[in-house]
Image (cartoon, rainbow, N blue to C red):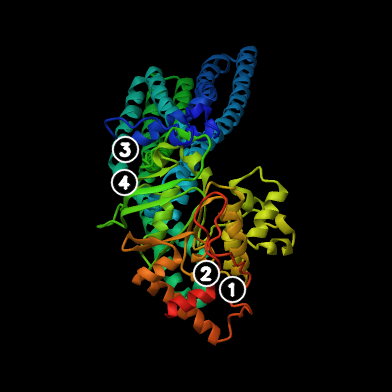
Amino acid sequence: MPAVSTVHPSTSPVSPDDDAREVRPRIAPRPARVRHSTSLWRLRTYLYPYGSRYLVMAVAAIAGVALSMAIPLMTQRVIDGPIARADQRGLLVLGTVAVAIGITEAVVLFLRRWIVALANNGSERLIRTDLYAKLQSLPMSFHGRWQSGQLLSRMMTDLSIIRRFLGFGMLFLVVNIVQIAVVVVLLLNLYWPLGIVVALSIIPVAWLCLVNEKRFTRLSRKIQDEQGDVASAVEEGVHGLRVIKSFGRFAHLYSGFERRTQQLYETSMDRVKLSSRFLTFLEVIPTCTMIIVLGMGAIATARGDLTIGTLVAFITLLLSLIWPVAALGFLLAMTQEAMTAADRLAEILDAESPLVDGTKVLEAPRGHLRFEHVGFRFDDADQNTLTDVNLDIAPGETIALVGGTGAGKTTMTALVSRLVDVTEGRITLDGVDIRELRIRHLRRLVATAFEDPTLFSMSARENLALGRSDASDADIEQAIDIAQAHFVHDLPWGLDTRIGEQGMSLSGGQRQRLALARAVLVNPTVLVLDDTLSALDIHTEALVEEALKRVLADVTGIVVAHRASTVLLADRVAVLSQGTIVAVGTHSELLATSQEYRELMSADFDAEVELEECGSRPHATDGHRSGARPEVDGEQPPDGRAPRHPDRSGDVRAEVAR
């Protein structure tokens, strides 16, 4: 067994920051008692790195409110003092002070807005990066349950709602409540009978807020979920555009999309109606209060119970309450939206991955892979996809997995790199359970080329070097040569040509060849080829297979095969049927002993015969596949492994025919 070491996350070759983000989002722990506001409160930890800025922002906001309330009081002093006594000097002094207060308030307002932008954008960036890292760390089973549009909606729309709340709603909700309380106290101090009228007017405002809270919350959640559905429909329509056009199903897809947008429109209008009624009452109540105060204030002034300066100051302060009270409904609505958005974000940040990261790394990996009584069942399945799978793959050996549709071949390959985890038994690499290895380390040892490859909207060079960023130009060219991906040099800017999203600007065969080159470039210990050659033409397939023989000679290989020609790349073949391995042996042995294997190979042979009869397949003059390299029977590789089988398509046909 090779040397194995246990690695602490801080000493990992992987960036510590990336590791920390992957398993420990900054969101605060979930409390035992959960309220509607819990998720939003848990996001407070994202404010901590910018705590000093938020503190300055709060101080500036309170200072601004204090300065705005000082101006009416200064007005009272001016009217009852210098103006009443015709004191020009006193009027000049107090007027200068009032102007200074106004200028100071403007400066404080500018500083607050500037600091809000710095702190708010920083917190948004932290939340977004944590969300992205969390999505990358979650297993394929999670992504299989979620629509990508719903995830995108949370990353963009919900996060924007929270950003607006942090930058505006949170601050002014607190400031407005403080302002209302302070102004009411000042009004009671100026003239308590009118102050009581104002204080009583707050009761219906509070009642309206409590009555409308739950319904507004429900509508906000429904709207945000429906926005995610619309985003999913848009994404499916864009990615499936070629299929939609080819089947002429635009009208059908459009009608479905229109139904979703209509539902979103109706729900949004329900919320608008609710908000309109709510905000109307919040506008009416202060206005009615103002009318009552003006009438009572005029009577009190006529009786001599109230000075003109005090009445002006009272009315000015009351006017300063109209916007905070009217905006209270808008701010509470924004708060409810933010709470709902935070709940949706927490659904991602709190998602638990069944994949537990190991702590070990292999110092000198050899590639000895073993499946020991392996079983696997999907979360929503009633029965196992794989059952009691046992397979021993020696270092440097290549195994072909053969089986009918749904036999479990792709699932078996996904287990090797822990895209999903076994539910029974274990898989070992060089004697170590792969669940004990660090996931990032394991995935550096195992490279997979999928049948339906994913390419990214970046240059061809960047796509190739995705798994090995330090690859030299010579390494890239070698991988291109192996995968017969020379077409990249014919692109407008060669390797620097930007490939469209999902690589849709390329053919299926070109995408497969780039994905194969990307996997080969990693120089892995274990190379998994999941029917990677299915989209290639016969001639290109033969050239790629010839080059792959050299690559597979130095690595442990697992090849999902549907063609007899691909089977011949392997040293041995494992036949899967109904989720279990029913036969293992060389190609010749299985042709002689396995009826199921003969049927699978016969199906491929019949398909090839049909192609040849139609003149679609080139014939090799020597009886071998084009580009095949015969090998001397019985020749033993120097490392003592089983000899690789020559590429003998003619022999395959003969044996199957017999």
Task: Give the residue at x 70% y 57%.
Answer: 497
Q: Nearer the viewer, residue 71 or 52?
A: 52
Instruction: Tell me the CA gap for discs 1 and 3.
Output: 67 Å
- Locate the C terminus by quadrant: bottom left
Of mark 4 and mark 3, the one earlier in the sequence is 3
Mark 3 belongs to which amino acid?
Answer: His
Q: Position of residue 653 (x, y in %)?
A: 48, 77
Instruction: Tell me the CA gap for discs 1 and 2.
Output: 8 Å
Mark 4 belongs to which amino acid?
Answer: Gly
Of mark 1 and mark 3, the one earlier in the sequence is 3
Residue under circle 4?
Answer: 425
At mark 2, the secondary structure is helix
Check the image and report above or below for 113 versus 190: below
Instruction: Tell me the CA gap for discs 3 and 2.
Output: 61 Å
Label 4: few (<14), some (14–19) or many (≥20) C-alpha neighbours in 10 Å: some
Closer mark to the observer between disc 3 and disc 2: 2
Task: Give the residue at x 37% y 53%.
Answer: 145
Are dots 2 and 4 in contact, CB under 8 Å?
A: no
Are dots 1 and 2 in contact, CB under 8 Å?
A: yes
Q: What is the tally of numbered marks visible in this picture? A: 4
Closer mark to the observer between disc 4 and disc 3: 4
Residue under circle 2?
Answer: 565
Residue under circle 1?
Answer: 625
Mark 2 belongs to which amino acid?
Answer: Ser
Residue under circle 3?
Answer: 36
Instruction: Tell me the CA gap for discs 1 and 4.
Output: 40 Å
Of mark 2 and mark 4, the one earlier in the sequence is 4
